[in-house]
Amino acid sequence: MDPGVTVSASEHDQAVVGKLGLTPGLAVQEIGWDDDVDDDVRVMIEDAVDGELVEEAVEPVDLVLLWWRDGDGDLVDGLVEALPDLTDSGYIWLMTPKVGRDGYVDAVDLAEAVETAGLAQTTTASVSADWAATKLVRPKGSRR
């Protein structure tokens, strides 16, 4: 991006929504919410899917939004616990603090946890000044 170009909030939101592949009608479960999450990102996701984020999934969801920080516990356990709530083609957006922020999750630790949980990392995106998103999917051929 050119340093002299200003991007409006709505343009930024549209870019993030595009990166995250959010469309109206997706059922999204949110896990790991705490005071430090980016509420603007949450609202942007709700607006994009035209629905509220659910805390407890009653039926399978298309997407789990998992906020995770170093110190939240065992990331492998967190990932595995998110899987049963997903549809067969569902995926996880793992939201972690960016480098230098409190709770930053080391990239090597993240990669090891993803592999141990039986998932594959496909995409990463910067969603705000403090949070990065990593898309995690079940590898092809291993759908539940």
Image (tube, rainbow, N blue to C red):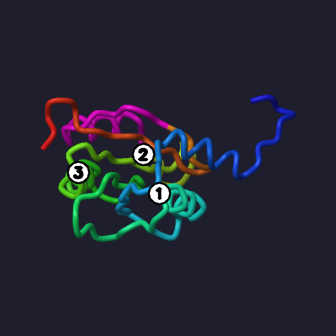
Mark 2: few/some/many CA within 10 Å (<14, 14-19, 20+): many
Q: Is residue 15 magenta?
A: no
Instruction: Specify the quadrant of the image occupied by residue 47.
Output: bottom right
Q: Which residue is mark 2?
A: 105
Mark 1: few/some/many CA within 10 Å (<14, 14-19, 20+): some
Q: Position of residue 68 (x, y in %)?
A: 40, 55
Q: Secondary structure at mark 1?
A: helix
Q: Position of residue 57 (x, y in %)?
A: 26, 67
Left-right relation of 11 to 102: right
Q: Earlier in the sequence, mark 3 or mark 1?
A: 1
Q: Is 101 or 114 nearer to us in this picture?
A: 114
Residue at point 52% right, 39% down? 19
**From what the image shows, is residue 141 above or below residue 38?**
above
Residue at point 42% right, 55% down? 69
Amino acid identity at mark 3? Thr
Q: Secondary structure at mark 3?
A: strand
Q: Secondary structure at mark 2?
A: loop
| Residue at mark 3 to residue at mark 1: CA–CA distance | 16 Å
Q: Which mark is residue 95?
A: none
Q: Which residue is mark 3?
A: 87
Q: Which residue is mark 1?
A: 49
**From what the image shows, is residue 120 above or below residue 103?**
above
Q: Earlier in the sequence, mark 2 or mark 1?
A: 1
Q: Which residues are magenta?
A: 105-124
Disc 3 + disc 2, Cβ < 8 Å:
no
Mark 3: few/some/many CA within 10 Å (<14, 14-19, 20+): some
Amino acid identity at mark 1? Val
